Image: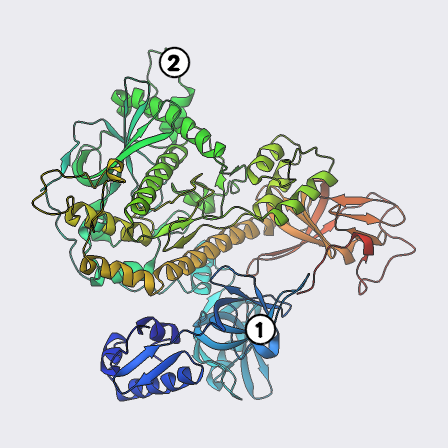
């Protein structure tokens, strides 16, 4: 089918009927079969109470009983619907899935309300959008049937293949196949598909990357439209070419996206005037054009290690990237900061800048090691001799801005990615920070440590500006971690005898916990526990607090337009404000306000932009643009996590059978997880492999305790293990503990089938 239910509903207004012919045109339906499928879909949605059909057309109907959600299933068969409105997750039993798969966007009806220690239950009523259009699988023969068993064990299904695909059965365990879904399960019919190609498991780095791209359906990127970037206009553009300007870059991979340029001036009152110059992508892309739609479909740039899958087309990237010694157009903001780095005022403009130099990681490290009064200039700084003072000032300002952010409740964690060459540019976090609700702690002189602090303030400025002017926007939101989750982390810390001071109401602060854990000898495992409680950054159509940015009002990303489509969209809105905004009530009024500056706040009582100008932006938000970009962000984040896990597993393969010293990173009733150097790969020591005793799980103390020998395995303990097995496709590493001689067996060894004994008074588990 050419369209999904979500596509159909997005096109329907809820205010007046849309003629059927216009709906067909909006969905690009021209064939008779496609139009017939639309009518079948409309009839089904009418029965569900989601649409109403009239002689004049079709209208969307609000049904509060049906809740939009995305399915998240586990390998054990448990499925939950994660509500898009942020409400409590809904437990879905297998007979209530109605052929929906993990990752599908669905409509759910609650059948049983939740209670204490129990989630609400529901059933899938409609599949809005299928997530899995292709998958990686291994083949098996069952009688006369050839079946594909998905490698992703969260997909609780088999795919029936044509008999011709039996030719791939001989590939065995040395290869997997990419299966394209031809028919999803419906009624009594099972899912069917066909083998698109065979992929080797042990084919080297390039083959591993192809596997991951295929797994996440990122390998067949549609080609960019053959359209030249639009020319920019000189009218009304501020000439900032005389302002000393530098680029700070930490990425060196092929097709790495161009980033912002920075300028800095000291004020007479010891404050700062910081200029952030962003590549003006929006000026070169017409809203709603074929290029704009293609960029929206891509959503984000994707780092593949030492190469990138860029967001922009080659022509667009070439037109927007800043180059040393050349005058180029930009979108800029002037941020007025006090001596402590607090934001006082801001003003946006279309500008022309001239970058004087580019400082990478080596140059900034040389700057940090250079003695203050040294007369010699290191080789890495030779080309930046005229900008050394500017770079030193940027380091000092970056430190001030970071302190301001942390004081406002933001969180930095010392959890960098392992130093593996395969990870390439992934080891340097993006300048806008982590989307996971925390930032990687970086040295003060690291290029991205400076850039991200400047970008955070610039994004805060636009968020505040749009909110104050009552304009639509794509706002980034990052809610604080829940007190209940943080209390569990506190319990784990107290069980390790780590003293903590709580507030008068007893609620812990995630930022305070992060700083307290950083001063202990169990910093990494405790910060990992804290990381799991933090909420991800999501896009919303309304202004909202952003804990990671330390912002209580609004954050609207716009500086990283080479990385994220949301920034391009906000840039388009900013340009519309600068070029078409009404700066006075009527032509009879001689006094104008400066719509580009925060000084206009509170002085405007007239519509800044006409309804016709705002309509495309309002329509985008009403049709779920924020949710679509959030989903794309989740998909790319899962890919990056898989890329890291694959690199770690490959590093662990040659170490099979070797004793290694690791650190316990998590404890569960079925065993404990251990991080093993040098790749920091995490593996499981299953409780059934602990032959020396019967182990009890103490959930409140986060430990396993032997009944006879009282040996304890707890969070943060150092333990010697052997890597027994590595499955790089599923990123699973099996470990075994190296026991002291004489402790390998126990007379009262428990039956592995029974598992562990758990103290009932110590059990904090909950029902689904």
- 225 relative to 74 in the view: left or right: left
Q: Position of residue 362 (x, y in %)?
A: 38, 29
- 36 relative to 111 in the view: left or right: left
Foreground residue, 608 or 92? 608
Q: Position of residue 190 (x, y in %)?
A: 52, 84
Does the CB distance between marks 2 and 1 fall below 8 Å? Answer: no
Q: Which residue is mark 1?
A: 122
* Residue that lies at the very extreme toward the right in this rendered image: 747
Foreground residue, 697 or 709? 697
Quadrant, the C terminus: bottom right
The quadrant holding residue 734 is: bottom right
Inspect this view and state whether residue 445 appears.
Answer: no
Foreground residue, 1 or 313? 1
Query: Is the residue marked by circle 1 packed among few (<14), some (14-19), or many (20+) residues within 10 Å?
Result: many
| Secondary structure state at the residue bearing disc 1 | strand
Inspect this view and state whether residue 514 appears.
Answer: yes
Image height check: is 664 above or below 472? above
Quadrant, the N terminus: bottom left
Q: Position of residue 582 (x, y in %)?
A: 16, 47
- 379 relative to 228 in the view: left or right: right
| Label annotation for residue 524 | none
Query: Is the residue marked by circle 2 packed among few (<14), some (14-19), or many (20+) residues within 10 Å?
Result: few
- 765 relative to 528 in the view: left or right: right
Q: Earlier in the sequence, mark 2 or mark 1?
A: 1
Residue at the (49%, 67%) spot, across then down:
69
Q: Which residue is mark 2?
A: 372
The quadrant holding residue 489 is: top right
Q: CA distance from mark 2 to mark 1?
A: 66 Å
Q: Position of residue 331 (x, y in %)?
A: 22, 41
Q: Nearer the viewer, mark 2 or mark 1?
A: 1
Image height check: is 328 above or below 213? above
| Secondary structure state at the residue bearing disc 2 | loop
């Amino acid at each position: 089918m050419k369209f999904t239910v979500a596509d159909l509903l997005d096109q329907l207004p809820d205010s007046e009927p849309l003629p059927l012919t216009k709906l067909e045109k909006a969905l690009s339906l021209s064939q008779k079969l496609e139009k017939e499928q639309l009518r079948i879909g409309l009839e089904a949605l009418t029965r569900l109470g989601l649409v109403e059909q009239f002689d004049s057309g079709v209208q969307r109907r609000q049904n509060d009983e049906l809740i939009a959600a995305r399915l998240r299933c586990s390998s054990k068969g448990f499925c939950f619907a994660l509500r898009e409105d942020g409400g409590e997750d809904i437990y879905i039993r297998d007979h209530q899935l109605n052929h929906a798969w993990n990752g599908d966007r669905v409509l759910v009806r609650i059948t049983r309300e939740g209670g204490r220690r129990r989630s609400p239950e529901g059933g899938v009523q409609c599949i809005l959008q299928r997530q899995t259009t292709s998958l990686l699988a291994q083949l098996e023969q069952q009688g006369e049937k050839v079946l594909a068993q998905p490698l992703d064990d969260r997909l609780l299904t088999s795919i029936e293949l044509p008999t011709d695909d039996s030719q791939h059965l001989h590939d065995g365990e040395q290869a997997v196949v990419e299966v394209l879904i031809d028919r999803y399960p419906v009624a009594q019919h099972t899912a069917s598909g066909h083998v698109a190609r065979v992929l080797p498991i042990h084919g080297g780095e390039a083959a591993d990357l192809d596997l991951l791209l295929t797994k996440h359906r990122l390998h067949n990127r549609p080609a960019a439209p053959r359209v030249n970037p639009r020319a920019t206009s000189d009218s009304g553009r501020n000439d900032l070419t005389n302002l000393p300007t530098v680029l700070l870059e930490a990425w060196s991979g092929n097709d790495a996206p161009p980033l912002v340029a920075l300028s800095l001036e000291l004020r007479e009152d010891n404050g700062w005037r910081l200029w952030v110059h962003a590549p003006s992508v929006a000026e070169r892309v017409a809203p709603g054009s074929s290029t704009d739609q293609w960029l929206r479909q891509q959503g984000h740039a994707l780092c593949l290690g030492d190469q990138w899958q860029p967001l922009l087309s080659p022509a667009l990237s070439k037109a927007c990237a800043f180059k040393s010694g050349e005058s180029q157009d930009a979108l800029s903001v002037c941020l007025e900061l006090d001596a402590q780095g607090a934001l006082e005022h801001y003003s946006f403009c279309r500008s022309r800048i001239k970058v004087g130099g580019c400082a990478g990681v080596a140059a900034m490290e040389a700057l940090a090691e250079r003695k203050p009064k040294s007369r010699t200039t290191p080789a890495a700084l030779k080309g930046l001799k005229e900008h050394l003072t500017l770079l030193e000032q940027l380091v000092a300002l970056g430190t001030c801005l970071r302190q301001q952010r942390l004081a406002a409740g933001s969180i930095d964690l010392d959890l960098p990615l392992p130093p593996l060459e395969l990870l390439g540019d992934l080891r340097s976090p993006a300048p806008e920070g982590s989307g996971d609700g925390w930032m990687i702690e970086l040295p003060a002189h690291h290029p991205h440590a400076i850039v991200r602090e400047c970008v955070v303030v610039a994004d805060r400025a636009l968020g505040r500006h749009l909110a104050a002017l009552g304009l639509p926007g794509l706002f980034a939101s990052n809610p604080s971690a829940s007190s209940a989750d943080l209390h569990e982390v506190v319990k784990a810390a107290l069980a390790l005898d780590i003293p903590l001071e709580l507030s008068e109401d007893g609620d812990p602060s995630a930022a305070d916990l992060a700083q307290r854990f950083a001063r202990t000898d169990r910093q990494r495992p405790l910060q990992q526990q804290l990381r799991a409680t933090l909420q991800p950054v999501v896009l919303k159509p309304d202004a909202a607090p952003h804990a990671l940015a330390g912002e209580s009002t609004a954050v609207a990303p716009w500086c990283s337009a080479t990385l994220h489509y949301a920034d391009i969209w906000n840039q388009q809105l900013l340009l519309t404000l600068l070029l078409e905004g009404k700066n006075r009530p009527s032509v009879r009024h001689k006094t104008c306000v400066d719509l580009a500056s925060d000084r206009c706040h509170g002085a405007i009582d007239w519509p800044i932009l006409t309804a016709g100008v705002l309509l495309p932006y309002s329509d985008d938000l009403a049709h779920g643009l924020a949710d679509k970009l959030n989903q794309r962000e989740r998909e790319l984040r899962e890919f990056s996590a898989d890329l890291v896990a694959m690199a770690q597993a490959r590093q662990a393969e040659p170490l099979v059978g070797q004793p290694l010293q690791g650190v316990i990173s998590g404890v569960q009733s079925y065993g404990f997880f251990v991080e093993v150097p040098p790749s920091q790969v995490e593996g499981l020591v299953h409780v059934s492999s602990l032959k020396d005793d019967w182990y009890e799980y103490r959930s409140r103390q986060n430990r396993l305790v032997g009944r006879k020998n009282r040996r304890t395995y707890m969070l943060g303990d150092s333990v010697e293990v052997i890597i027994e097995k590595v499955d790089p496709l599923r990123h699973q590493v099996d470990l075994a503990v190296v026991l002291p001689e004489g402790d390998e067996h126990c007379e009262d060894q428990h039956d592995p089938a029974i598992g562990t004994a758990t103290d009932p008074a110590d059990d904090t588990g909950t029902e689904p």
